[in-house]
């Protein structure tokens, strides 16, 4: 193959090559949308269950099991917070609308799931939403070219700083 043919094949194999530079959301807007989506979903997750249903669920599960389930919800909330912070870091680069929607949906699903688990009345749907959001975020990070580029830039910066650290 000639050099021109190799370049054409390389350009055609790049994912989203026609979208680069078009329709990207700025980092500030994307990050604001992320915070809004996470907060709105968390509030919705806690408000879905009424006080009466929450009381019935608490009475049905017992105090020890309720405490265990809420402790697990708190641990899962910490995991969801780490994922949301990673998405916040990723949104430091411009994102196309499909990627942004995927990240927002994954974080919102995790946030609403935590509220559903905490109220004890909708544990199964809450667990499903929380784990589906977590898996979706992992897949999005794995497939997102911007994540690879940002990590490569961090590694390159660290490698560039290594000779200076050894000299001291």
Image: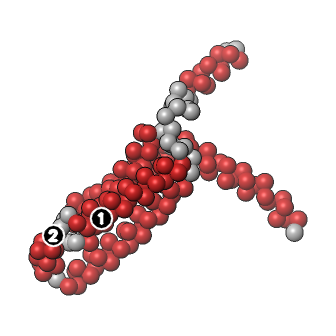
Q: Can residue 110 be seen by looking at this rendering?
A: no
Residue plotted at (62% across, 19% down): 8
- Depicted 154 relative to depicted 76: above or below: above
Image quarter of residue 125: bottom left
Toward the right, the furthest residue is: 167
SS at circle 1: helix
Relative to the observer, which residue lies in front, 134 or 42?
42
Residue 43's disc number: 1
Question: Left or right: where does residue 1 sit relative to residue 87?
Answer: right
Across and down, in percent, residue 44 comes to 26, 61
What is the crowding at mark 1: few (fewer than 14 residues within 10 Å), some, or many (at least 20)?
A: some
Residue at label 2?
A: 50
Image x and y of residue 97, in percent: 44, 39
Q: Earlier in the sequence, mark 2 or mark 1?
A: 1
Residue at 39% in and 57% down: 36
- Cα–Cα span, label 2 and label 1: 13 Å
Decide: is 61 above or below 6.
below
The location of residue 70, given as percent across then percent down, is: 29, 76
């Amino acid at each position: 193959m000639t050099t021109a043919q190799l370049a054409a094949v390389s350009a055609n194999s790049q994912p989203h090559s026609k979208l680069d530079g078009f329709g990207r959301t700025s980092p500030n807007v994307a990050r604001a949308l992320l915070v809004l989506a996470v907060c709105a979903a968390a509030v919705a997750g806690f408000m879905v269950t009424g006080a009466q249903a929450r009381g019935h669920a608490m009475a049905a599960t017992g105090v020890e099991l309720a405490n265990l389930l809420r402790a697990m919800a708190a641990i899962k909330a910490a995991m969801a917070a780490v994922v949301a912070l990673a998405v916040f870091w990723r949104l430091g680069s411009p994102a196309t609308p499909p990627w942004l929607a995927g990240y927002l949906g994954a974080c919102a699903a995790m946030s609403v799931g935590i509220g559903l688990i905490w109220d004890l009345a909708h544990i199964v749907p809450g667990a499903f939403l929380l784990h589906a959001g977590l898996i979706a975020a992992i897949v999005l990070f794995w497939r997102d070219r911007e994540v690879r580029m940002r990590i490569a830039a961090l590694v390159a910066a660290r490698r560039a700083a290594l000779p200076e650290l050894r000299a001291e």
